[in-house]
Image: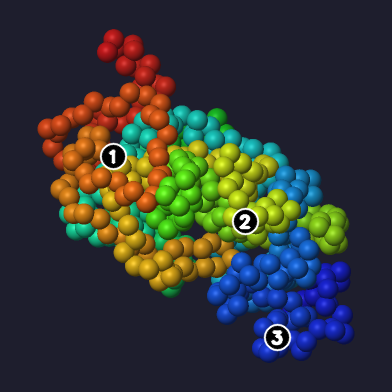
Amino acid sequence: MTTPSSSWPGTDGATAPPPGCPAHGLGPNGLRRLYGPEADTDLAGLYEKLRAEHGPVAPVLIHNDVPIWAVLGHSENLHMIRTPSQYTRDSRIWRAVRDGTAGPDNPLAPVFTWQPMATFAEGDEHQRLRGAVTGAMSGIDHRGVRRYINRYTNHLLNDICQDGQADLVSQFAEHLPMMVMCHILGMPEEYNERMVQSARDMIKGTETAIASNAYIMKVMMGLVARRRAHPEEDFTSSLIAHPAQLSDDEVGAHLRLVLIAAYEATANLIANVLRMVLTDPRFRAQLSGGQMTVPEAVEQSLWDEPPFSAMVGYFAKQETQLGGQRIRPGDGLIFGIAPGNVDPMVRPDLAANMQGNRSHLAFGSGPHECPGQDIGRAIADTGVDALLMRLPDVELDVPESELRWTSSILSRHLVQLPVRFAPRPPQDVMARPSAQVPAPRRDWHVSSPPPSRAPEPVAAQAPQQPASAPLAENERPKGAWRRFLTWWRGY
Ligand code: HEM
């Protein structure tokens, strides 16, 4: 192994256990591994050990025993991601990449290998690429999107409501964000099981991940070609038309970035919020006497179980200090979202309610702060709220102790969320939730915020659409151009 930097503890070998000593569960130079048995079973506990041993910034090993710093402190993480003069996301300067220690065979290579995308860019190039993405996002009609989230939620619930039981991870949380994102990108007809499977595959890094990535890229590039020829009122057409003049490859790469970032993070968020609502005593009015709205539950979940637990990573551009450690140019650092969110400096009492406090790290900060956070929040808020209104008697169908997660440094994913509820008939997807539903359970109390606008008209007799049916032309949300045309044509 190449010595990462002579300032790392244990690198003189004098006090360290033998390299790779299994008895200590440690890797070369006595450094703790953020992968393997200990990390797989209790990553949060491992972060706390590191915090106790090293403070807010700890030297660790990731897959293939590549050395890197884990940033654990809340303020240290914020400093790193908000100081582009010292730290960059451009992995080409990482010493481990330059000397080949972190090569293409590394399981984390898909997330750290440089690509011509906003995520890895900085300065003017970052502004050009990110500006195109945020410019295209600004055309999204958020009210219209909420309407579609409600409608897609009802499509999904229609598929399960007669059964009286379901797995809310595979039958709800993993589908809703994909349906909404396909709609936003302008390809509702492309939403199908294969898109969901392919996205899931890519993230899990299974053997078929490369084929799945190729499938998603083919769908994206097909969409780019169609919209280049015939622009419409959607995110893809706006991205193509943006003055930044992205090439077709750049448009395709950013569509994939947006789709995958949105799909994975939002699916995790929905699953986590539903799990919390179903199991957490803070939501049980009889026990706590309190109330929490769904958006507050979402925010609490973003603190406790951020959908991305960490990012690999940020890279030092110059010699600097962070959390008492000497950082050398070319060192790699993990943006520690989950450990930063539980830093005792900002959360001395983890049980305390974080209501009204949005300073968690779940969406990052600084130049790369997530530009899609409002959409992610909207999908989770609206989707969970609509589910609880349709299935107010929903409850966990297994003991809480039987719930299982898969975890890696990057994210923690609830495997299944089995629930039961009284079977009921499907509903017209255009309608507001029916009053003919069982009374809400009395032992939890998640209340919805008061509606900000009048309910939509109920199309009581409208025929029901299949879940994957393309949206009729007159159902597409109206962007500025469409609104102008509507006004111009006088209707
Ligand atoms: C709950 C949902 C979401 C979470 C927790 C989340 C979280 C994040 C985080 C932590 C970053 C990286 C920050 C950094 O590099 O320092 C990020 C970047 C990004 N996210 Fe999200 N995200 C979510 C939803 C979305 C959605 C819905 C979209 C698109 C509609 C989106 C698009 C992006 C893009 C394009 C970037 C790259 C920005 C850049 O590098 O300049 N995300 N997100």
Q: Percent x, y for residue 346? A: 70, 50
Q: Quadrant of the N terminus?
A: bottom right
Q: Which residue is mark 1?
A: 151
Are the residues flagged by discs 1 and 3 in contact, CB closer than 8 Å? no
Taking the image as shown, residue 246 lies to the left or right of residue 389, namely right
Which is more N-terminal, label 2 or label 1?
A: 1
Q: How many numbered markers are drawn?
A: 3
Q: Which residue is mark 3?
A: 24
- Disc 3 marks a residue whose amino acid type is His
Q: Percent x, y for residue 419? A: 31, 60
Which is more N-terminal, label 2 or label 3?
A: 3
Q: Nearer the viewer, residue 333 or 53?
A: 53
Residue at the image point whose x is 85% and y is 60% from the top? 324
Q: Percent x, y for residue 215? A: 38, 58
Residue 467 visible (yes or no): no
Report the Cα–Cα distance between label 3 and label 2: 29 Å
Q: Which mark is residue 350?
A: 2
Closer to the eye: label 1 or 2: 2
Q: Which mark is residue 308?
A: none
Report the Cα–Cα distance between label 1 and label 3: 53 Å
Q: Nearer the viewer, residue 47 or 334?
A: 47
